[in-house]
Amino acid sequence: MAASLPLELLAEVAGYLKNASLVACTAVCRHWRAVFEPFIYSTLNIYSEHGFNKGGICLRRFQELSSGAGIARRAWIRQLWYYIIVPFDLPDWNARKEEGYSTNNAIRQANDTAFETAIVNLFDTLESWDKTHCLSISLVLQGRELGQELSTEEDDEAGLYTWDYTDGRTRSVPVYRARFHDNGALMLRDVPCIDKISLPHRIWAGTAMQIARHCPELTELHLDLDDYIRPDHLECIKERRQGEWIVRPTPEHEAMIAAIDDWEAEICDSERGCMQRPIFEQEQFHRLFISLGYAARHMPRLTAINFDLNHSTNLSFRFSNTTGSFSAEWELRLCDSYKPDDRVAAAWGFQLDEMLVKNDGLQLIATLPHCPLVEGRSTDFRRT
């Protein structure tokens, strides 16, 4: 009786059981196997090394399952979560330096070697896949055991800024970010089947871009660069190129900030509140959206832009043409915190007086002129 169930009903069963193991269902009969295997293989967790996760699929086993007699399975696979196993887990800001400490040590080098090998092996495995497969890859860095570098001491205040620890910039152990050894990226092959890739903050940004560079058909790149910064790192940050403030406090808070004469006390006192910056520098945001507008109109393959200002006063921008209609949309947390001007409207090709205002002014929607597309592309920006 089970073998005679229609495909539509079996697909409903598979969808209902999607969070459970479907492997047992493939053993019922060939009919069931043909239905359930595409669901099983659509999203896979792959481990760079054998034996890390009991029952998990290592990269070598994955290669066997998707090659030779199993090459047809490639058409089912849509997303890979690739767990890069490194020898040591090195959490951020949990240790301080002792005399003789250097970031160029055996612990970090061992992690980098394992990381480089895992990435190279993954790209070697996927190189032969056809670009029409459109794989989505999410990388995850995972240590076998908690590690402690030489000449360091555990310190749970290494990430804090207190009266007893105001010099963490020089005393705290710098965060570990996985990277290639010198010229390691040269071993990477181009992999056209990778359509989307997500890279965690525990991979150095430079290495993340080296990885992305070897995905020639990439349409989406997600970078997690939201790192935790101590107040005493501001000295280093100030040495970078400086821009203008894009958000400001209220006049009342501006006066309070101007009256602060002891910033050390202000930062170390945990009971003092954080100053909000609810006022947007309109011109800075106008320039951003003017640039995006003119750029988008010269990119016929672009299908979406998502911009999120991760700030106490949120601002989100969405451009989309995936539904057959073309629109630009701003979502605000505070009414009138931002409003496009005539230059922004000209850049995107709409009239200000035709912009739709919804949700008491918290949602602004502009319908854009139709622009034919050649091929889909999307871009995701996040400002923190």
Image (cartoon, rainbow, N blue to C red):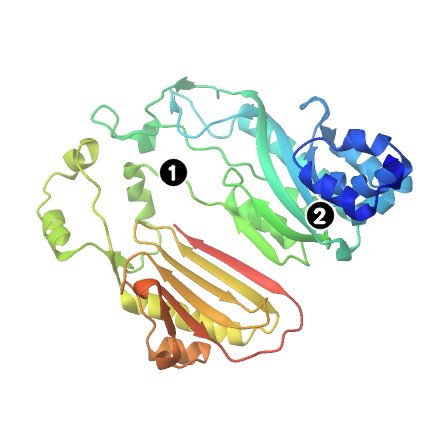
Residue 365: x %, y % from top left: 42, 70
Q: Which mark is residue 78?
A: 2
Q: Quadrant of residue 247?
A: bottom left
Task: Decide which of tag 1 and tag 2 comes sooner along the chain.
Answer: 2
> In the drawing, does residue 383 fall left or right of residue 209?
left
Which amino acid type is marked by label 1? Tyr
Q: Position of residue 103 (x, y in %)?
A: 47, 30
Tell me the tag on residue 97.
none
Q: Residues within 10 Å of mark 2 (few under 14, many from 20)?
A: some
Q: Determine whether the residue tagged by mark 1 lies in a helix, strand or loop.
A: loop
Vertical placement of 381 versus 106: above or below? below
Left or right: 320 as drawn, with respect to 137: left
Measured along the vertical axis of the image, is residue 42 above or below residue 295? above
135 relative to 309 in the view: left or right: right
Disc 1: which residue: 228
Residue shown at the point (13%, 48%) measured from the top left: 257
Residue 245 is at least partly visible in this image: no
Q: Is residue 5 visible?
A: yes
106 or 27, nearer to the observer: 27
In which quadrant will I find the N terminus?
top right
Q: Around disc 1, counting alpha carbons within 10 Å, would you say few (fewer than 14), some (14 to 19), or many (20 or more)?
A: few
Looking at the rendered structure, the secondary structure element under dot 2 is loop
**Residue 193 point in image, percent of width and height:** 73, 53
Position above or below: 273 against 298? above
Q: Please, what is the three-letter code of the amino acid marked with disc 2? A: Arg
Q: Nearer the viewer, residue 288 or 78?
A: 78
What is the spatial separation of the Cα atoms under label 1 and label 2, in whole angstroms? Answer: 32 Å
Where residue 212 sits: x, y (%)?
A: 61, 51
